[in-house]
Amino acid sequence: MYRYLISGKVQGVGFRYYVQKNAQRLGIKGYVRNYGPDVELVTTIKDFFEKADEPPLHSSISKIGVSFVEEKVPDEFKIRQSVL
């Protein structure tokens, strides 16, 4: 699984719902959640943002970190509870 850590204005602008909508459209599995001041996305594809639609109008991404994580693939894509 690929773990993205997205920084910038990504909370309070519908960013997690945007990610969920695109994940469902693309048929991928994983999850998204607020992670401190950032958003964490764990998914089965490495090029999520190249395939996704434009992000919400009021969001702005300043940095995206990507790493590989050993994690069981979920049955579907979900928005998970935030981690503070």
Image (cartoon, rainbow, N blue to C red):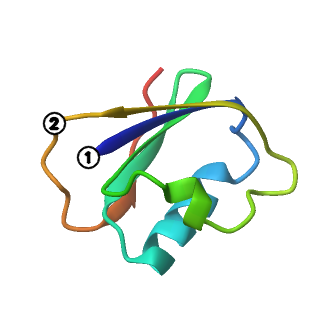
Indicate which disc residue 9 carries. Answer: none
- Element type at marker 1? loop
Q: Which residue is mark 1?
A: 1
Quadrant assignment, res 68: top left
Amino acid type at mark 2: Glu
Q: How many marks?
A: 2
Q: CA distance from mark 1 to mark 2?
A: 6 Å
Specify whether 30 is left or right of 7: left
Q: Are marks 1 and 2 in contact (CB under 8 Å)?
A: yes
Residue 12: image location, x then y, percent: 73, 42
**Residue closer to the observer: 15 or 51:** 51
Query: N-terminal of the two: label 1 or label 2?
Result: 1
Q: Establish if 9 lies above or below 20.
A: above
Check the image and report above or below for 51 versus 48.
Answer: below
Residue 30, quarter of the rendered image = bottom left
Residue at image coords 31%, 63%: 29
Q: Secondary structure at mark 2?
A: loop
Q: Nearer the viewer, residue 11 or 7?
A: 7
Relative placement, left or right, of 73 versus 52 is left
Disc 2 marks which residue? 70
In the picture provided, is 37 more to the left or to the right than 8?
left
The three-letter code of the residue at mark 1 reads Met
In this picture, residue 18 sits left or right of residue 8: left
Vertical position of residue 52 compared to residue 15: above or below: below
Who's the residue at 55% across and 70% down the image? 21
Residue sitting at x 17%, y 55%: 73
Residue found at the very far right of the displayed protein: 58
Looking at the image, which residue is at 27% across and 68% down?
76
**Mark 1, other Cα within 10 Å: few <14 / some 14–19 / many ≥20:** some
- Residue 26 at x, y percent in the picture: 45, 76
* Image spot of residue 51 (x, y percent): 57, 67
Dot 2: within a 10 Å radius of its alpha carbon, few (fewer than 14), some, or many (20 or more) residues? few
